[in-house]
Amino acid sequence: MIVKIVSESFDPWQEIQAFQHSAQAMRGKVGATSVFVGTMRDFNEGDAIKGMTLEHYPGMTEKQLCNIITAVMEKWQVIDVLVVHRVGDIFPDDPIVLVAVWSSHRGDAFDSSRSIMEALKSKAPFWKKEILASDDQRWVEKNSDGYLKKD
């Protein structure tokens, strides 16, 4: 498990490639990789957004993300997880978050990556301040749509 909080732009695909090349213990065991990349969009709640500042609680954020991943790894058969999350000034089309999960089977990979992402959005201490096209600023109050599993 690797959790990285970064203040500079990152390339999610390079992060995945570097992780896979360094993870010798995964070789021959992986049957599925599930990847989620969240990017900043230029709208929210009906308004045009030109940027945002994403803040976190250093130390606590990483610990909470590790707790989320540990719980997921206990529930599903997961081989390894990589989470990279951006903080600082972010602009439309910038990657904000990468969640990558490696597993032997696709069901575990899909379910665990979605669970990590939903828990990250609702439990990890991140705060977003949007900069509207009008240059007004506002804190984002609703950080997750929530997830209801459909049977």
Image: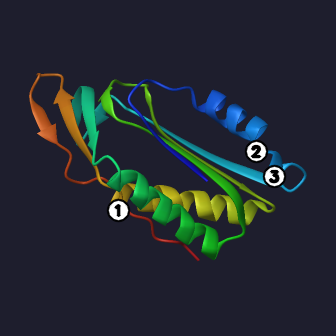
Q: Nearer the viewer, residue 101 or 147?
A: 101
Whole-number angstrom distance, CA of label 3 to CA of label 1: 30 Å
Residue drawn at point x = 78 percent, y = 53 percent: 32
> In this rendering, does residue 145 appear at all?
no
Q: Which residue is mark 2?
A: 23
> Which residue sits at x=76%, y=44%?
23
**Residue 5 position (above or below residue 25):** above
Q: Residue at x 28, y 37 (%)?
A: 54
Helix or strand or loop: what does disc 2 sit on? loop
Q: Amino acid at mark 2?
A: Ala
Q: Is residue 36 left or right of residue 33?
A: left
| In-front residue for pair 57/36 | 57
| Image-quadrant location for residue 70 | bottom right
Q: For the residue carrying disc 2, how many other residues have a C-alpha within 10 Å: few (<14), some (14-19), or many (20+)?
A: few
Which dot marks residue 65?
A: none
Q: How are the colours assigned in the image?
A: rainbow
**Residue type beneath disc 1:** Lys
Q: Position of residue 47 (x, y in %)?
A: 20, 33
Q: Badge 3: how crowded within 10 Å, few (<14), some, or many (20+)?
A: few
Q: Residue at x 49, y 59 (%)?
A: 66
| Residue tagged 1 | 123
| Above or below for 137 versus 50 | below
The residue that disc 3 covers is: 25
- Which is nearer the N-term, disc 3 or disc 1? 3
Residue type for callout 3? Ala
Q: Secondary structure at mark 1?
A: helix
- Are discs 3 and 2 less than 8 Å apart at CB? yes
Q: Quadrant of residue 46?
A: top left
